[in-house]
Amino acid sequence: MHDFDKLWNYNEPGETEQKFRAVLTNSNDQENAEYVLELKTQISRTLGLQQKFEEAHKLLDQVEAEMKPEYPIAKIRYMLERGRAFNSSGKKEESLPLFLEAWELGVEVKADFYAVDAAHMLGIAAPQDQQLLWNEKAMDLAENSPDIRAQGWLGSLYNNIGWTYHDAQEYEKALAIFLKALEWRAAHEQVIETQIAKWCVARTHRSLGHVDKALAMQYALEKEMQTAGQDEDGYVSEEIAECLTLQEKPQEAAPYFLKAWTILSQDIWLKQNEADRLSRLQKLGSIKP
């Protein structure tokens, strides 16, 4: 059977949806029932990433109706995607019991990869005072699992734990874990993820008051991406602008604020959830010499 998970491109959910539907068309529901149910859960995930939550839930309703006790992996994946659909649409409370059940079943059947996924989602959706606990559970399982796929979660988990510390204003702890994430990403030759990890380290230096160091790191990251022929990154531009503002250089910061607004204002999630942030970028980007 085709390993359809290899077709995932999380940055292009619409394109991934079409690939998954092509695989589904060529699949035999009777011969590969659990496989087909798993595939449908991932199609629902592509829909959620496109903000098509009603369609995602309708497809998951089909999966739920066809679920059987002898399909534990399909059940775990169903619960994960139902939970993600709720969480991404702002219904965190409804997502929590689904993620918890997915975690418990994953541990029970030793499906470490999916158990880590469930714990990592609880680290995002659970109340703030429980997030670190769940991320640490996920990290402990991933670090000690013989499953290479489960170990592959570590970069994301280090990142999530770093932001949990950062949100709690424990910046030294955040920096330590972000540096660990950077080391892990670089060792696994994950180019884009390594760049994100560098951004996180630089952002935390700004929070610690190391503005000159933070700015130098963001400039270096901007140059690295330009040299590689990558698209400009709105978050890098935003951070450069914030650092320049702290250095009391509003005229130098303005074009970076404008660049950040131009790029980030195209993000559907930011438009829906961080309108004030985008408005501020636009305002600060309009400063004239």
Image (tube, rainbow, N blue to C red):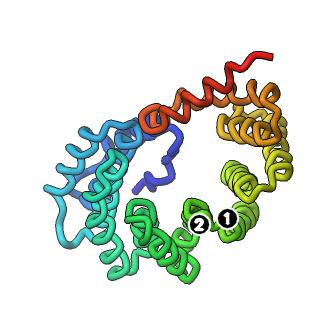
Q: Quadrant of residue 259?
A: top right
Query: Is residue 235 placed above or below 195 in the rendered structure?
Result: above
Does the image show residue 32? no
In the visual, does 266 lie left or right of 112? Answer: right
Query: Is residue 228 placed above or below 250 in the rendered structure?
Result: below
Residue type pointed to by label 1: Tyr
Q: Position of residue 235 (x, y in %)?
A: 66, 40
Residue shown at the point (81%, 45%) measured from the top left:
215
Badge 2 element: helix
| Cβ atoms at labels 2 and 1 below 8 Å apart | yes
Residue sitting nearer the eye, 142 or 28: 142
Alpha carbon separation for disc pair 2 and 1: 7 Å
Residue sitting nearer the eye, 109 or 255: 255
Quarter of the N terminus within the rendering: bottom left
Badge 1 element: helix
Q: Which mark is residue 171?
A: 1
Q: Label 2, on which residue?
A: 165
Residue shown at the point (68%, 19%) measured from the top left:
286
Q: Position of residue 144 (x, y in %)?
A: 56, 83
Q: Position of residue 47 (x, y in %)?
A: 35, 40
In the visual, does 200 lie left or right of 25? Answer: right
Q: Position of residue 133 (x, y in %)?
A: 47, 76
